[in-house]
Structures are given as structure tokens and as C-alpha cells.
Image (cartoon, coloured by chain):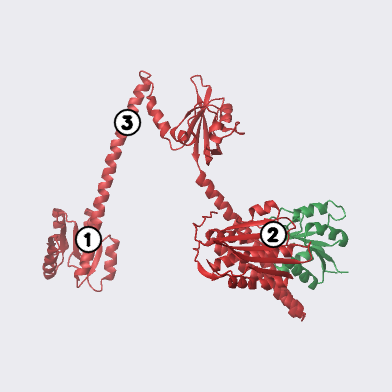
Chain colours: A red, B green
């Protein structure tokens, strides 16, 4: 059906010309020469769209707009405005005009306004359809519910007919969580489909056998508490399947009573919240990071203050040595802060590995020159053992360098911390093995015990108190894993440590390293 | 004789900083970088005041403090906690708690309030 459009303008010429072009565009065009006539036509014909001049003798366009909107708010009214009528035009929008076009009317501007009007009509029509559909759906469903309620009531009050058990069984089975029923002897007497699917058929087994692969009841069994108190319980438990998968679950219990109100069974409902728990862990490690990083920053800032103080005091006392001492402290602190910031940035960003062929001997020399000044300052000897004929190797030079610098700096720190030995050295080895390159960093510093060793590649494990954030080795391990390689450590307390980093030559599947 | 302050912090740079700051203002100082060493220094030097870091490898500040206060001769030495940790309750009897990075003027004022001017 063609949309009906009412064109209102006191100038006959405009009515004629616009009328023809609008009819050409597929509208049924009605027209009126003033507001009063327009309202009469509107009453009679109920057009979808009204296009009206804003300035007319007698009733003006704004009044006409308001009257039309009063009668039928869904009518789309487009205003035609003169050049200096901007205020009026804006006023018309406040009265919910669809749009306005300025004289002289360009076909494009008018078409845009009309299109806007048509879209609004279409959307409104669709919305109406949906609403009506929804209403009829609600009517239909509530009628059905009422019928069910009625039949239930008549069954309950009338013949004491038992409810249809198969229907309850179906609901029980379809519940998207684990539901079991347990007697006082820990035997499962029923289980829903999801439970049977993940944990196996109950078949008279005990709950702890099926849910936990355990040989004895859990301490703090919530079902026991419910048997005892008659009250529902809520708790978190870890369930374990026969295949060894474990789920974190949230468990509710509720008593099941017989005709004499005795509790004979307890119903357990468990929801898998493993993902939630993982998220919790992730958040906890983030919190840990913020704590660890802020602690480290505080220490570094205090050190920086110290360095600046020494410089100031040195200048005041004209003590060149103290100025130099302060300057060394400032350099050291700035270096630590830089290292930490880079580690944090690295940790925050997922980076792709970009391999390029690298001359290993040159690469190893460069690395040595990065760490050598720090070692020299602390009187630690650097022993380079680069195998001959290392050749070229494809790796992400920037990333592998960052990883090795972290390891080398740790080796230096381990030597500085050690006060037992009189001489310290760090051995940096590079060699080729079939299909891989091996980097080794061996120090004779303080070494590590088994506990420290076990955790060093995890996030925020630091054994360096104020000086470490626990990011360095984590980042190193992440880089190595991204290269498809492996990193290991051998160490004993007081005996130093040896880190080995092996990177494969061919690009294997990078190991996904979740934190 | 100038009043003596014992500085306990595992970071040698911070020890250096506090030493210079306090000595420039007329106090005499001694220092320790572990809790175990600190107890020896306290016994030997009998300081008038102690600045104490809370988090140190091997022995933490609060543990050192508990051991020190078991000795009746040492238990009344005032302690100022200077730490990056938020834990005002770790040492309840501390005369002041400054968090790192601390304001040097505030530290000097706190020291002065606790034990007065250097001599």
C-alpha cells in the first residue's frame, strides 16, 4: 500500500511542484493550503506523513504539528522552514517533528527526511507486531498455567491421585547440575543424568567413592550435617571423576522426609563452578602482583631518595666521593625500575615470536657486554664458554636476549648475596646440539633450596625481598615456552645454580602458558 | 656524646641513606642488615633508638622485635618502623610508623620527638 502523505503549504506553486515529485516517488499525495484545512483532511484521511510549511497565515506550522501529534502521536511530521527559521525549526523538533527541510527544498534533503519518516513508521509497526505477539503468547501461556493449576488442585483435593512420577523424573534428570540422593549410610540411592554421565551409575556406591574417588567419607560432610540438624547446608567441594578430572563445585543439601517427618535421605545439588574458581585464582594472582609490584616500587623509590640525598649532601660538603656514591645509587635504582617496568609491560602484553636468523656468536658476545659492567662493579668474573662454529640460528633475538639478561642478572644477584665464598664467577655457555641451541648460565652464588626451586618460574615468586618482583624468571620462562623450548634449573643451597635454556630449531607448536 | 641510632634494613642502599641522613643531622649510627645480626648490635651498642624494616629475608622485623623485648635491659628502646608494608599493627609499641618512600624531614622530626636533639 502506498503511504499517504499530506502536503500543507500556502503557496500553490510549491504544492503543485512538490506534489508531482512526491507522487512520482510513490506517495498518495493529499494537500491543504492552511492549517485549518489540513486538520480537516487529516481527520478524514489519517495520513502517515505530513509535510508542512512552518510559516503560514492563520494557524502556523508549529500549532498544526502540535494538534496533529495530539490526535495521533505516531504521525510523522516533516517541517519546511525558511532560511532564518532555525529557532522555529528546533522548537518543532522539541514537539517531536521527525525532521525539517530548508527552503529552497533540495530533492536529496527531502528524500532523506522522508526515508527517516518511513523507517520510523516501519520500526513502530514491527514493534507493535512483536508486542502483540508477546501479549498473545502471555495470554496463551497463562491460560495453560491456569488449567494446570486447576487440574492439580482438583487432583490434590479430590481423589488423592498421586502426581505423575515420570514427569518429576524427567525434571530431575534434565536439571543442568549434579543431583544425588543419599541415605544415612553414604549410599547413593538416586542420581540425575548429568551426574551419571560424569561420575558413573550410583549402583549402591557410596557418595565419597563416586564424587571424590576417596575411600572414606569427607570430613565436614554437609549431608551428615543436614541429617543431624534437618537444616539445608551450602558448601564448596572439589569433585573428582574416575578419569581424574576435578571440578570445583558449590553444593547445596536439603533433607528428604518420609510420611512421619523423619529424615530418611538427603538431596545434594552441586553446581560446577570450576571456571569461577579459576577466575578467582587469576584475580588473586593479579592482587598479588599489585602488592608485590607496589612493594618493590616503594623500596626502589626509597633507594632513589637515598641516592639523591647522597648527591645533595656530597655537593653541600664538597665531597666528590659522596656525590659519586649517590650517583651510583641513582643509576642502580633507575636500572632496577627500568627492568621492572619492562617486565611488567612484557607480562601485560601477549607478543608474537618473530624469528630471524641470528649469528649466535655475535648474539652471545652482545649479551655478555650487557651484563659485564654490573659484574665488574661487584668483582664477579664472567667466564664465556662459547662452542666453536655456533653458526646461525632462527630466534626472536629481542625476546631471547631479554630472557637471558634476566637469568644473568639473577646469577649476579645470587653471587652478591653470597658471603660464604671469597671469589665469584658466572659461566655463560652457548652450544649447539642436534636440532637445538643450548644456553647455560651457571653461578656459584647462594643457590636455592627445593621449595624455592620449585616455584621460581611462577609469577611473583621472588626470594630477593625488596629487590625482586618475581616477574623476571616468569617472563624468561614465558619467552622460552613461546619458542617451543624448555628452561630448567639445578641448584643446591650454598652451591650456586645452573639454568639451562633449550630452544628447538624447528618451530614446534608453542606451548600455551596460562597464568 | 651524640645519641646513637641503630638502623636495621636488609637493603644496604637504604642503610647508607639513613646513615648519611642521621649523621648529617648530628646523630651517631650503627646498622645491621639482618634481624640476627641486629640483636648482637643492640646488645653491644645499646642504641637510644632503632629504625626497623618489617620485611627482611631470614628474620622479619616483628620477630626480631619480640626477641629484643624479652631482654629487660633492651625492651624500652624506642622503635620507629620504616617499611614498604602496610602493617601498623605488626609492632604495636612502635613510637612511629613511616612508610617507604618516607619524607626525610618527617623522619628527623619523629626521631627528635622520640629522643630529642642529638646531644
Give residue A510's position: percent from left, percent from top: 50, 57
Q: CA distance from mark 3 to mark 2?
A: 77 Å
Q: Chain of mark 3?
A: A
For mark 3, what is the residue? Answer: A146
Separation of residues labelled 1 and 2 (CA atoms): 83 Å
Which is more toward the observer, A124 or A308?
A: A308
Check residue A497 in the rendering and tell me which mark sits there, or answer none. Answer: 2
What's the chain of the residue with tag 2? A
Q: Is residue A128 left or right of residue A345?
A: left
Which of the pair A19/A199 is nearer the observer?
A199
The percent position of residue A196, horizontal first and vertical second, equals: 46, 33
* Label drawn at residue A329: none
Q: Could you tell me how far apart the alpha carbons at marks 3 and 1 are, in whole angstroms?
A: 46 Å
Image position of B66 (left or right of A503): right
For mark 3, does the 10 Å Cα neighbourhood hold few (<14), some (14 to 19), or many (20 or more) residues? few
Q: Secondary structure at mark 2?
A: strand
Residue labelled with disc 1: A77
Relative image position of residue A76 (x, y in whole percent):
22, 58
| Quadrant of the drawing holding the C terminus of chain A | bottom right
Amino acid at each position: 500500500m502506498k503511504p499517504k502523505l499530506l502536503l500543507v503549504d500556502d503557496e500553490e506553486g510549491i504544492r503543485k511542484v512538490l506534489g508531482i515529485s512526491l507522487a512520482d516517488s510513490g506517495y498518495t499525495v493529499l494537500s491543504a493550503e492552511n492549517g485549518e484545512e489540513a486538520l480537516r483532511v487529516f481527520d478524514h484521511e489519517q495520513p502517515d506523513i505530513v509535510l508542512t510549511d512552518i510559516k503560514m497565515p492563520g494557524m502556523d506550522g508549529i500549532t498544526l504539528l502540535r494538534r496533529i501529534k495530539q490526535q495521533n502521536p505516531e504521525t510523522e511530521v516533516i517541517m519546511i522552514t525558511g532560511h532564518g527559521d532555525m529557532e522555529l525549526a528546533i522548537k518543532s523538533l522539541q514537539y517531536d517533528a521527525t525532521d525539517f527541510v530548508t527552503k529552497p527544498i533540495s530533492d536529496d534533503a527531502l528524500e532523506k527526511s522522508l526515508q527517516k519518516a518511513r523507517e520510523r513508521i516501519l520500526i513502530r509497526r514491527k514493534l507493535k507486531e512483536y508486542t502483540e505477539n508477546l501479549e498473545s503468547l502471555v495470554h496463551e501461556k497463562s491460560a495453560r498455567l491456569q488449567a494446570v493449576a486447576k487440574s492439580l488442585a482438583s487432583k490434590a483435593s479430590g481423589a488423592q491421585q498421586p502426581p505423575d512420577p515420570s514427569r518429576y523424573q524427567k525434571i530431575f534428570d534434565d536439571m543442568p547440575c549434579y543431583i544425588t540422593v543419599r541415605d544415612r549410610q553414604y549410599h547413593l540411592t538416586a542420581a540425575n543424568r548429568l551426574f551419571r554421565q560424569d561420575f558413573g551409575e550410583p549402583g549402591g556406591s557410596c557418595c565419597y567413592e563416586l564424587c571424590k574417588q576417596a575411600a572414606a567419607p569427607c570430613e565436614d560432610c554437609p549431608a551428615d550435617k543436614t541429617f543431624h540438624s534437618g537444616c539445608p547446608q551450602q558448601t564448596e567441594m572439589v569433585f573428582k571423576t574416575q578419569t581424574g578430572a576435578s571440578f570445583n563445585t558449590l553444593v547445596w543439601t536439603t533433607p528428604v522426609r518420609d510420611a512421619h517427618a523423619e529424615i530418611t535421605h538427603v538431596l545434594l545439588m552441586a553446581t560446577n563452578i570450576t571456571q569461577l574458581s579459576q577466575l578467582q585464582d587469576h584475580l588473586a594472582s593479579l592482587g598479588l602482583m599489585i602488592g608485590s609490584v607496589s612493594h618493590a616500587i616503594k623500596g626502589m623509590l626509597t633507594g632513589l631518595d637515598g641516592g639523591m640525598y647522597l648527591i645533595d649532601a656530597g655537593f653541600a660538603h664538597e665531597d666528590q666521593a659522596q656525590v659519586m656514591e649517590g650517583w651510583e645509587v641513582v643509576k642502580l635504582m633507575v636500572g632496577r625500575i627500568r627492568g621492572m617496568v619492562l617486565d611488567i609491560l612484557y607480562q601485560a602484553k601477549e607478543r608474537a615470536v618473530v624469528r630471524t636468523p641470528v649469528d649466535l656468536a655475535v648474539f652471545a658476545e652482545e649479551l655478555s657486554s650487557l651484563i659485564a659492567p654490573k659484574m665488574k662493579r661487584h668483582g664477579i668474573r664472567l667466564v664465556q664458554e662459547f662452542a666453536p662454529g655456533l653458526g646461525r640460528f632462527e630466534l626472536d633475538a629481542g625476546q631471547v636476549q631479554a630472557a637471558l639478561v634476566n637469568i644473568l642478572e639473577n646469577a649476579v644477584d645470587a653471587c652478591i648475596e653470597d658471603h660464604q665464598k671469597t671469589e665469584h664467577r658466572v659461566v655463560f655457555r652457548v652450544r649447539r646440539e642436534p636440532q637445538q641451541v643450548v644456553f647455560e648460565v651457571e653461578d656459584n652464588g647462594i643457590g636455592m633450596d627445593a621449595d624455592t626451586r620449585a616455584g621460581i618460574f611462577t609469577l611473583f615468586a621472588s626470594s630477593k625481598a625488596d629487590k625482586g618482583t618475581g616477574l623476571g624468571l616468569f617472563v624468561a620462562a614465558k619467552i622460552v615456552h613461546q619458542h617451543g623450548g624448555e628452561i630448567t634449573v639445578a641448584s643446591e643451597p650454598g652451591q650456586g645454580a645452573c639454568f639451562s635454556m633449550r630452544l628447538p630449531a624447528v618451530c614446534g607448536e608453542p606451548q600455551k602458558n596460562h597464568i | 656524646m651524640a645519641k646513637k641510632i641503630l638502623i636495621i634494613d636488609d637493603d644496604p642502599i637504604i642503610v647508607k641513606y639513613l646513615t648519611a641522613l642521621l649523621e648529617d643531622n648530628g646523630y651517631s649510627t650503627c646498622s645491621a642488615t639482618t634481624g640476627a645480626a641486629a640483636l648482637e648490635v643492640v646488645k653491644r651498642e645499646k642504641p637510644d633508638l632503632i629504625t626497623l624494616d618489617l620485611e627482611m629475608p631470614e628474620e622479619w622485623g616483628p620477630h626480631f622485635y619480640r626477641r629484643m623485648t624479652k631482654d629487660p635491659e633492651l625492651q624500652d628502646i624506642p622503635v620507629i618502623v620504616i617499611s614498604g608494608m602496610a602493617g601498623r599493627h605488626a609492632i604495636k609499641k612502635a613510637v612511629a610508623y613511616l612508610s617507604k618512600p618516607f619524607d626525610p624531614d618527617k623522619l628527623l622530626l619523629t626521631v627528635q620527638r622520640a629522643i630529642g636533639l642529638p646531644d
